[in-house]
Image: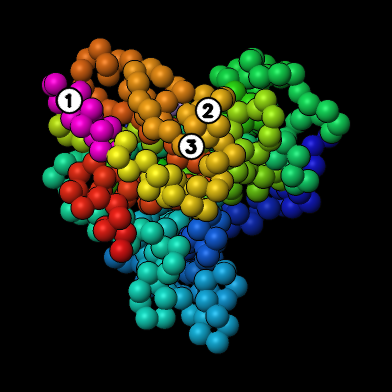
Amino acid sequence: MAAVSSSSLLNKAVRQQYMSLSQGGKCQVTYIWIDGTGESLRNKTRTLDSEPKSIKDIPEWNFDGSSTYQAEGSNSDMYLVPVCMFRDPFLLDPNKLVLCEVLKYNRLPAETNHRASCKKVMDKVKEDCIWFGMEQEFTLLGTDGHPFSWPTNGYPAPQGPYYCGVGADCAFGRDIVECHYKACLYAGVKIYGSNAEVMPSQWEFQVGPCEGIEMGDHLWVARFLLHRVCEDFGIVATLDPKPKTGNWNGAGCHTNVSTKRMREQGGLQFIEQAIEKLGKRHNEHITVYDPRGGQDNIRRLTGHHETSSINDFSAGVANRGASIRIPRQVGQEKRGYFEDRRPAANCDPYTVTRAIASTCLLDSGEEKESK
Ligand code: ADP
Ligand code: MN
Ligand code: MN
Ligand code: MN
């Protein structure tokens, strides 16, 4: 039996009695933010007297940054600035989820708040109408850290039947994926699709197309929903880019990109231009494609298991062993989008989309922009 949390075994019928109580016209708003790890999310809830109609109706708040790896205890208050509002699929209407930026005591962005600099770049390239779609791969684990449904001793049958698989011997934990999908739709997160992945108990959902800053906002909230759904089921979703060494696929966050010109007739030439620019800044991109400057991705980008080597830049039509893939249909229609396959599953979508937008569309590139 898989190790599941005690919380998931609490009596849900009892819970339901309370969940169906009326809430007297008040509104519960759950504030969500990225903590000092740059990977984990935190959240806390407060009451508003009425339902907020837009993000402007949600007040700033604060939290104790010394408990989230974000501040010293002696000067620990951090600001939460609401940036994006969603419906709450757990507490239901009229309650809200709100993604926040974190500011320090001096109102400058916290170290792991990469939204602020991403937004600056996205505002500069507004006329290009840059769209992103990110493919979030993840792996389900028991609370003991062992892959969900893998034999306690030993390994499952080798990779082959699991990608997009069906059946009790091929698909493990589909409940999570289906519930997460519904939660995203209810919330208003732009989920695009989902599928079972190559490694058993590994799955993917996609978010997009999203324009500019919206990509990071929607992916972070989609990740919050994933962790929250998993919590209900008593298991864990990890975004580790290589949860199992050996002959098992890693987990990425392929990033699909297009500008208005790329989407129009003959747009392939602009895709090729963008790829040429990306090739000149390969190393800079690798340092922002995972939260540890490439140290996580080095375990994944081996040149095997449908990846390119972390040391080389390559591009090709329908090539899943390249850094950049041009989908076959895009090659045929000579317009559309390209896929950057390098970002790790645990990347910050704000740093990834910022780097791509500035390299492809700003002369100064990423280096100057991030300062
Ligand atoms: P793959 O074949 O690599 O597995 P997926 O079907 O998993 O691709 O994901 C495709 C992604 O591409 C989705 O996130 C979708 O939103 C995104 N996408 C589709 N069209 C565009 C476009 N024109 N520009 C940017 N992203 C796009
Ligand atoms: Mn995919
Ligand atoms: Mn995939
Ligand atoms: Mn892909």
Give the residue at mark 3.
310
Which of the 4 quarters of the picture holds residue 94? bottom left
Q: CA distance from mark 1 to mark 3?
A: 26 Å
Give the residue at mark 1.
269
Which secondary structure dominates the residues rendered in magenta? helix
**Which SS class for mark 3?**
loop
Question: How dense is the environment of label 3, judged by Cα within 10 Å: few (below 14), some, or many (20 and up)?
Answer: some
**Front-most of residues 164 and 173:** 164
The numbered dot on residue 37 is: none
Above or below — where is 35 with respect to 264? below
Q: Amino acid at mark 1?
A: Gln
Is residue 355 visible from the viewing direction of this image?
yes
Q: CB under 8 Å between callouts 3 and 2?
A: no
Q: Is mark 1 within 8 Å of ligand 1?
A: no
Q: CA distance from mark 3 to mark 2?
A: 8 Å
**Which SS class for mark 1?**
helix
